[in-house]
Image (cartoon, helix red, strand yellow):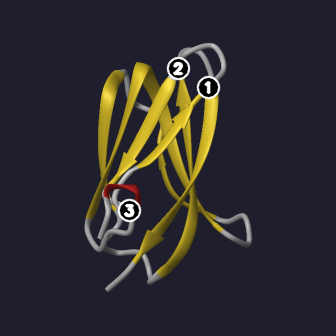
Amino acid sequence: MGLSGVFNTRKRPWGQTIQVYPNPTSGFITATSDCNIRSIDVLSFNGQIVYNNTNLDARTARINVSDLPSGVYLMKVTTTKDISSVKITVTH
């Protein structure tokens, strides 16, 4: 699998970069940013919040998604400068 299958990177026009890896995953997923991450939400594709952590203040966050059913989710990363959404895949 090439590197593009492991990392999801979003570079914003004003220079902020969000990376989410590994993707797909069956356990932990890591989000990194140039700015401090304030919160992470994981939403099912029907809009239900299946994971939420609003107690973050770091450039890296690691979350456990192993309890989620296999499928495609939307990970919303809120930083001090922006909100970014990244599609993630959970596999078992």
The residue positioned farthest toward the right in the image shown: 46
Instruction: Report x, y in % for residue 69.
Output: 44, 82
**Looking at the image, is 40 positioned above or below residue 2?**
above
**Looking at the image, is 79 positioned above or below residue 72?**
above
**Looking at the image, is 42 positioned above or below residue 70?**
above
Instruction: Report x, y in % for residue 3.
Output: 32, 56
User: What is the number of callouts on the image?
Assistant: 3
Q: Say left or right for 84 vs 69.
A: right
Q: Amino acid at mark 3?
A: Asn
Q: Earlier in the sequence, mark 1 or mark 3?
A: 1
Q: Nearer the viewer, residue 22 or 38?
A: 22
Instruction: Tell me the distance, in whole angstroms, between the alpha carbons under discs 2 and 3.
Output: 20 Å
Q: Residue at x 52, y 20 (%)?
A: 16
Q: Nearer the viewer, residue 90 or 51?
A: 90
Q: Residue at x 33, y 24 (%)?
A: 59
Look at mark 1 in the image and give the residue it sits on.
12
Which quadrant, please, contains the C terminus?
A: bottom left
Instruction: Tell me the distance, in whole angstroms, between the alpha carbons under discs 2 and 1.
Output: 5 Å
Res. 34 image quadrant: top left
Q: Residue at x 41, y 27 (%)?
A: 33
**Looking at the image, is 72 positioned above or below residue 41?**
below
Label 3 neighbour load within 10 Å: few <14, some 14-19, many 20+: some
Q: Say left or right for 92 vs 13.
A: left
Q: Amino acid at mark 1?
A: Arg
Look at mark 3 in the image and give the residue it sits on.
23
Look at mark 2 in the image and give the residue it sits on.
16
Instruction: Report x, y in % for residue 10.
Output: 54, 37
Dots 1, 3 in contact, CB < 8 A: no
Dots 2, 1 in contact, CB < 8 A: yes
Instruction: Report x, y in % for residue 15.
Output: 55, 15
